[in-house]
Image (spheres, rainbow, N blue to C red):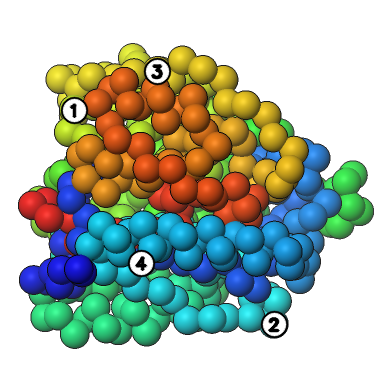
Amino acid sequence: MVSVPTHLVSADTEWSPLRSVIVGHAADSCFPTAPPHMIKATMPEEHFASFRPKNRFPASLLDRADAEVRQFVQILRDHGVLVYRPKAIDWFAEGGYTAAMPRDGLITVGNTVIEACFAWECRHREIELGFSEILADLEKDPVVRVVRAPKVERPDALYEGIRGFGQKDAVNGEVNGTHTVHSHEWAINNARPAFDAADFLRFGKTIVGQLSNVTNQKGVDYLRSAVPEGYSVELLDVTDEHAMHIDATILPLRQRLLIYNPERVSKRALQKLDLFKDWELHAYPYQPAPRENPPRYMTSGWLLMNVFSLDEKKVVVEAGDVEFAEYIRKLGMEPIPCPFQHVNSIGGSFHCTTVDLVRQGT
C-alpha cells in the first residue's frame, strides 16, 4: 500500500526511508549532441560517431530499457513508494535527449527542488518538456519551492577559449575541434553558471559535489545561492579527467558508510572534508567486468555503483552485478536485484533515473 507523504517534497539524504520519487522513462530517447571536444572529454571513444544530431537509440534497446524501468517502478511500489512518471516526449522531434535521467536535471534539498543549468544545449528544455507538469503539482504544496534554471542566451559561450574549440574535428569533420583534458582544464569555461544535478549528493545539511566537464564554479555558486538556508555545498577533489556526474565515484549507503571509486577519488581527498572525518570509507576492491552487449554507449563499468537506496538497509542494484551485490551484503546491506543493462546503455542507472522527493525523517 502506498503511503501519502505529509509534504510533497522533503529530502536531504540519499539513504533515509523513501516515500515518493520521480522515475523517468526511456521511450523515444536519442543520442545527445554536443561539440566534439565535449564528446571526447566525456564519452567512450568507440562510440564517438553516434553522438550526432537526431540519431535515435535502437528501438529494440529502448523497448527493453522501458521494460526494465517498469520492473524497477513495480519494486518501488511494492515497497510502498509513491511514484511519479514524466509525460511522453518525442525527443527526435525536439532535438533533445531523454526523459530517462531526471537526476541529471533536478535535485531536491529539503523542501526545495532545484533545476540544473545544463551545459549541453540539447538538454536545455529537458525538464520543461518532460517534467513541468510534475513540478507544477509539487508546487501546490505551499512549503515546496521550485527553482527553475535561468534561460541561456548564448550556449556556445561556455566553450569560448577552450583549447581546440572552433577547429576542425578529425573524427567527423565538424568544426568544433578536439580538446585534451588536463587536471585543471575542463570542456567548459566559467562564462555562465553550468551544472548537472548528478554532480552532487546530499549528506544532510551538507551537499557534496565536484567540478567536472559539465559543472563549473559559477554553477556551484548558483547552487549555493539556491539551496535553503542552513545548507552548504562542498567540493570534492576528484582525479577523473573525464568527470561527468559524481554518482559513480562515491556511494553513501547509510549514515557514516560510504564506498568510493579508487580510480576517481582518494580516501585522503574524502577525509579533507570534515563531513567524512568519522565515516567508514571503503574503496571498492574489484574491477568492473567488461560488457559488449548491450553496449555501454555513454558509461563505464563503474556504473555498478549507481544504485538506489530504499532505506538504510535496502538498495536496488543491477541484477548482473553479482559481485557488487555480495560486496555490499557483507557491509550489512540488502541488495535488491533488478535488470537494468539496457537503461545503462542510454546513459545511466537507478540513481540517474530517479529524483527522490520524500525521504522520511530527513
The residue positioned 73% from the left and 67% from the top of the image is 59
Marks 2 and 4 in Cβ contact (< 8 Å): no
- Measured in 3D between alpha carbons, the distance from the residue under mark 2 to the one under mark 1, in whole angstroms, is 45 Å
On the image, numbered disc 1 is attached to which residue?
Answer: 256
The residue positioned 18% from the left and 56% from the top of the image is 359
Binning the other alpha carbons within 10 Å of mark 4 as few (below 14), some (14 to 19) or many (20 upward) gives some
Badge 3 amino acid: Ala
On the image, numbered disc 3 is attached to which residue?
Answer: 283
Up the image or down, 163 lies above or below 360; here it is above
Query: In the figure, is residue 53 to the left or right of 298?
Result: right
Question: For residue 235, what is the image quadrant?
Answer: top left
Question: What's the mark number on residue 359?
Answer: none
Question: SS at mark 4?
Answer: strand
Binning the other alpha carbons within 10 Å of mark 1 as few (below 14), some (14 to 19) or many (20 upward) gives some
Marks 1 and 3 in Cβ contact (< 8 Å): no
Question: What's the mark number on residue 93?
Answer: 2
Up the image or down, 237 lies above or below 356; here it is above
Question: What's the mark number on residue 22?
Answer: 4
Of 112 and 181, the residue lying toward us? 112
